């Protein structure tokens, strides 16, 4: 099984958005309302997401990557300077998603390590990640990777507010 982790560029943005959308639909079914999961898969919303992401392509404090296994897009990561006022001057894993077909094969850990590497390149030695509280498997993953549950916050979607746990990695 061959894999690659490609930095996001104009040629692979659509794959990145489609993987993110499909991963949300697979992972958050039963957690996030169905109306939202259907909305993110519309042609209009996919195109809107592509345009939003294009604006961050040259930002040195906001980097995204696409994981391909046997040349098929199956995972994404996005890292940035923390957006949380309680955790300034550290990095943040803003997204780490895998399609169900490649979970539990070591790719999550691989993307996590890539995220740490990129956050270090940004000049940060610590990072946070938010994870929906009801997503128990992923909460367990971040704890296993050394994350310390330090707070929770509201995660707002149209017509739904969910609890998001915040994990801190003090030394990366």
Image (spheres, helix red, strand yellow):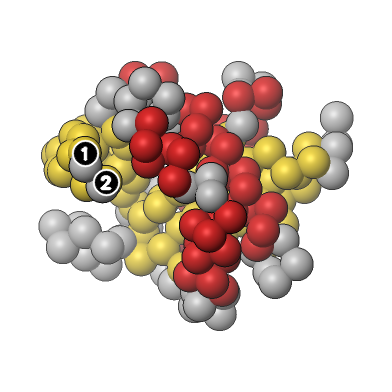
Q: Residue at coordinates 67% horizontally, 23% vertically from top-left? A: 101
Distance (Cα) linking label 2 and label 1: 5 Å
Q: Position of residue 10 (x, y in %)?
A: 70, 71
Q: Quadrant of residue 150?
A: top left
Residue 168 shows in this picture: no
Give the class, few, some or many, for how many residues have Cα within 10 Å of label 2's Cα (few <14, many ≥20).
Answer: few
Question: Foreground: 140 or 113?
Answer: 140
Q: Position of residue 52 (x, y in %)?
A: 48, 70
Q: Which residue is mark 2?
A: 157
Q: Position of residue 14 (x, y in %)?
A: 67, 58
Q: Residue at coordinates 50% horizontally, 74% vertically from top-left? A: 56
Q: Is residue 89 left or right of residue 104?
A: left
Mark 1 and mark 2 in contact (Cβ < 8 Å)? yes
Q: Residue at coordinates 36% horizontally, 21% vertically from top-left? A: 30
Local SS, label 1: strand
Q: Is residue 80 left or right of residue 163?
A: right
Give the class, few, some or many, for how many residues have Cα within 10 Å of label 1's Cα (few <14, many ≥20).
Answer: few
Q: Which residue is mark 1?
A: 160
Residue 137 shows in this picture: yes
Q: Quadrant of residue 12?
A: bottom right
Question: Foreground: 110 or 124?
Answer: 110
Local SS, label 2: strand
Question: Foreground: 41 or 28?
Answer: 41
């Amino acid at each position: 099984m061959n894999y690659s982790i490609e930095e996001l560029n104009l040629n692979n943005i659509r794959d990145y958005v489609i993987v993110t959308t499909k991963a949300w639909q697979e992972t958050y079914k039963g957690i996030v309302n169905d109306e939202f999961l259907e909305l993110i898969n519309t042609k209009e919303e996919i195109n809107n997401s592509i345009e939003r992401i294009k604006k961050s392509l040259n930002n040195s404090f906001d980097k995204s990557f696409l994981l391909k296994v046997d040349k098929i897009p199956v995972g994404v990561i996005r890292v940035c300077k923390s957006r949380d006022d309680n955790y300034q001057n550290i990095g943040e894993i803003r997204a780490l998603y895998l399609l169900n077909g490649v979970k539990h094969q070591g790719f999550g850990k691989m993307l996590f390590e890539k995220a740490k590497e990129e956050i270090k390149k940004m000049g940060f030695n610590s990072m946070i990640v938010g994870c929906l509280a009801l997503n128990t498997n992923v909460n367990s993953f971040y704890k296993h990777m050394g994350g310390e549950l330090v707070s929770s916050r509201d995660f707002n979607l149209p017509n739904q507010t969910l609890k998001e746990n915040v994990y801190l990695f003090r030394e990366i």
